[in-house]
Amino acid sequence: MSQTVGNIVLIGAGNLATQLSKSLLNNGFSVVQVYSRTQKSAQELAAELGCEATDSLTHVRRDAQVYIFSVKDSALESLVAELGSLVRGALFLHTAGSMPMEVFRGNADRYGVFYPMQTFSKSREVDFTGIPCFIEGSSQEVLSLIREWAGKLSGQVYELSSEKRRYLHLAAVFACNFTNHLYALSDEILQEQGIPFEVMYPLIGETVRKIHQMPPLQAQTGPALRYDRNVMDAQLELLNDSPGMQEIYKAISQSIYETNK
Amino acid sequence: MSQTVGNIVLIGAGNLATQLSKSLLNNGFSVVQVYSRTQKSAQELAAELGCEATDSLTHVRRDAQVYIFSVKDSALESLVAELGSLVRGALFLHTAGSMPMEVFRGNADRYGVFYPMQTFSKSREVDFTGIPCFIEGSSQEVLSLIREWAGKLSGQVYELSSEKRRYLHLAAVFACNFTNHLYALSDEILQEQGIPFEVMYPLIGETVRKIHQMPPLQAQTGPALRYDRNVMDAQLELLNDSPGMQEIYKAISQSIYETNK
C-alpha cells in the first residue's frame, strides 16, 4: 500500500490529525513528517509516529507523495496556498467536513478530500474501521487512489460532493457536537445538586438505542412534545441564573413543538 | 410481593403507564384497573394487562391498596384531588419527575413518588431492571414499602427529595429529550440531501461512549469549541430557510464557547 501512496506529510497535529496518522501508521502507510504551527504539538505527535517534526512551512519536506491537511478551516486556505507554491506534483488532501475540494484549485494539480465523520480526541484511540469516510477527487485517477487507501482504513467509504458534504457536516454538528454540549449542561445541573452524571447513562443509552429502531422524530418524548406548559415554565424558572441555558431550553422546546404538531 | 402491596389501580395509560404496568405485571404485582380520560386508551392498555378499564373517575375502584398516577403534570393535581375525595386509606403514588410529593397532601394519608428516569414509548418494551428509579415517601413506613417494591422492578433505587428531583428531571430533559430532537433535526438535514440517517450511527455511538470515559465538558469537539467563525457562519447560512434551527445553532454554539473558554 505504502508503495502506491508513497510518503505522507501531515499538515496539522490536532485531534483528527493525531488519530488519522496513528491509523495510517497501523495500516502500513509511511508518515514521514508532521507540521504544526506550534513546535510542541508537532513534536508530540511526531514522537508517537516516529517521524520528523517542524513548525516551519519552509522546512516541510518537498519530496513526499501525499500532503494531508488536517487543520482548522480558517487556516486551511492560506496553508494550501503557501505549501502549493513550494511543492510540485504531489497529491493534496484535506479532511474537513465544510471545506470544498476546490480550495486546492490552482495550488495543486492532483487533489481530493478524505472526511472521516467522527469525533476525535487526542486521548482516546478510535477504531477507524467503522468510521464512515466521505471522499472526493479532482480526477477519476485521484478518486480511485483515495478510495483504495481509504478502504484500508475504513469499511465505509462513500463518494460525496463538496456541496452535500457541507450539509453532512452540519448534520454531524447537530448530532454530535451539540448533543455532547447538552450532556455537559446536564452534567452541570446534576453537579450542583450533588448527583453523579452516571445516573444519566441508562437514559442516554436508551435514547440512542431508540433511534436505531425508529426515526428520531417518532422517538421524541418529554414536556415540550406534550406541550406541558406547567413543566416547561417551572423548568425555565430553575434556569433563572443561567440565561444561556434558558435560551437553549426555549429554542429547542419551541422547535420540538413546531416539528411535531 | 403482591400480598404486601395489594391491588393496584393505574391512573393514566400513556407511555410511562404502559411500560410500568407491564413491568409490574411481569414481576407478580396485581394491576386490577386502568383509568384514562379516553376510554380507548384505557381499554387498549387494560386488554394488554388483562384487567378492567374505565374513563370515569367515579367508576374507579375504591378498594385497591395502591393508586399510581402516571399522567401529564398539568392533569395530576385535579385528578389527585378528585380521587382523594373518593378513596380512603390507600397509598397514592405518582411517577412524575417535576411534581413535588406534596401534591398529595390533604388528599391522601399515605403517599409517595416513584420516578423511573427513562424515555418510554408505547411500542418499545423497556427492561426496568437497569432504570434508575427515584423514590420519596410521606413516612418511613411508606418509604420502606416503596423501596421494597421498587427493588423488585429495578436494581437502581435511590431516595431523592422533590426539590432535587426537579433538577434531575431538568437534566434528563437536556440529556434525552433535547438530544433526541437534535437527532431529528440532523435526520431532517440529511433527508433533504438524500443521505440516510444511518451514516450518523457511528458518530452518535462514539459521542456516547466518550462520555463514559471522560466528562462531557472535556469530550467537546467541533467548530464552536474552536470558535471557527468560517465554519459557523457558513453553517448558519445553510440554515437560512430554517429560522428555528438557526436559533438553536446560535444558542448552543454560543453556550459551547462560553462554557469552554
Image: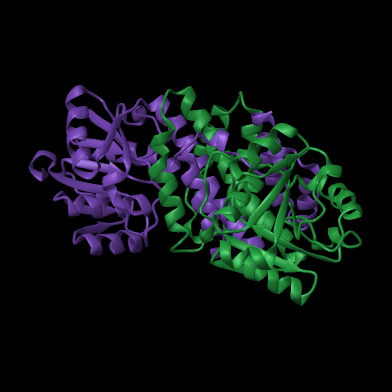
Chain colours: A purple, B green
Front residue (pair A197, B253): A197
Q: Measured along the vertical axis of the image, is residue B190 above or below residue A241? A: above
Front residue (pair B40, A132): B40
Q: Quadrant of residue B8?
A: bottom right
Across and down, in percent, residue B114 comes to 69, 61
Q: Is residue B261 visible?
A: no
Across and down, in percent, residue B78 comes to 88, 47
Across and down, in percent, residue B129 comes to 52, 60
Q: Quadrant of residue A124?
A: bottom left
Residue extending farthest left? A3
Front residue (pair A190, A92): A190
Across and down, in percent, residue B32 comes to 69, 50
Q: Measured along the vertical axis of the image, is residue A102 above or below residue A17? A: above
The image quadrant where one finds the C terminus of chain A is top right
Q: Is residue B258 visible?
A: yes
Residue found 82% across the figure and 53% down from its top: B62
- Whether residue B74 sits left or right of residue A212 in the image: it is right
